[in-house]
Image: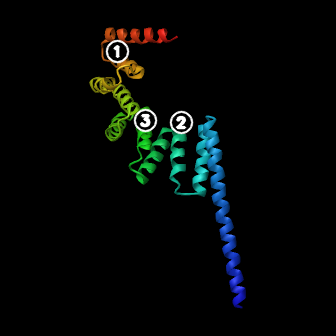
Amino acid sequence: MRKIHLTLWAATLAAVTTILFHATQQGEIGYWKAHRLFSSTAYAAAADEYEKSLERQPGRLDVLKELARSYQWSKNYPKAIETYRQVLAADPEDLDSKTRLAETLGWSGQYAESIALYREVVAKKNDTAAKLALSEVLLWNKDYAAAESSTRDVLKVEPTNPQARYLLGKILQASGRPQEATVLFEELLKEQSLKK
């Protein structure tokens, strides 16, 4: 009798292990399928596969991040924002996800929150791309003085940065200084033609 119970228990354990292994394996297969879809710019299809992968392997933060990015690139901003918030709830110090959330908020017109998040990122890491993204959202929010100040801060350190100079031209133009903007744009065009 004891042998029967032991055999039954071992068979049950083997069945459960096989089922769990299969689910994990399917989750991994789905993850890599989603990764390939994202790489081929099929962002919405990638999001579907990442969702399936998360169903099979809940709690995987790497899959959740990729799902958020897929939503972002498929322009499903509400889901991207919600998913990036889930990532940041699990890892509040994830500056990459915080930057992507700020970017998505900016793209969806939620400028105040985007600006606040970019300022957090800039305060924690000295990153030119984040500073310029902050400047861009400040421009979209029509806070021209803050956008100009942020951009000029970048130019103090990197005076020849073409992205910062172009952005400064856009800010000058938007803030009612088209002559200054034109001079800057002409300089950039002249430099570009000399490189060719």
Judged from the image, the secondary structure of the residue bearing numbered disc 2 is helix
Residue 111 percent location from the top left of the image: 36, 33
What amino acid type is highlighted by mark number 1? Gln
Per the image, the residue denoted by label 2 is: 73
Comes first in the chain, label 2 or label 1: 2
| SS at badge 1 | helix
In the depicted view, which residue is nearer to us: 182 or 83? 182
Q: Are marks 2 and 1 in contact (CB under 8 Å)?
A: no
Task: Determine whether, in the image, residue 53 is placed left or right of residue 186.
Answer: right
> What is the crowding at mark 3: few (fewer than 14 residues within 10 Å), some, or many (at least 20)?
many
Front residue of 166/72: it is 166
- 112 vs 31, nearest the viewer: 31
Question: Residue drawn at (38%, 22%), measured in percent from left and top?
Answer: 164
Q: CA distance from mark 2 to mark 1?
A: 29 Å
Disc number for residue 103: 3
Residue type (three-letter) at the residue carrying disc 2: Trp
Residue 170 x/y as whole percent: 37, 18
User: In the picture, residue 125 is in which quadrant?
Assistant: top left
Point out the tag, 1 or 3, that comes first from the N-terminus: 3
Relative side of 111 to 24, left or right = left
Mark 2 → mark 3, Cα distance in angstroms: 11 Å
- At x 31% / y 39%, what residue is drawn? 123
Q: Does 158 sit above or below residue 47?
A: above
Mark 1 = which residue? 173
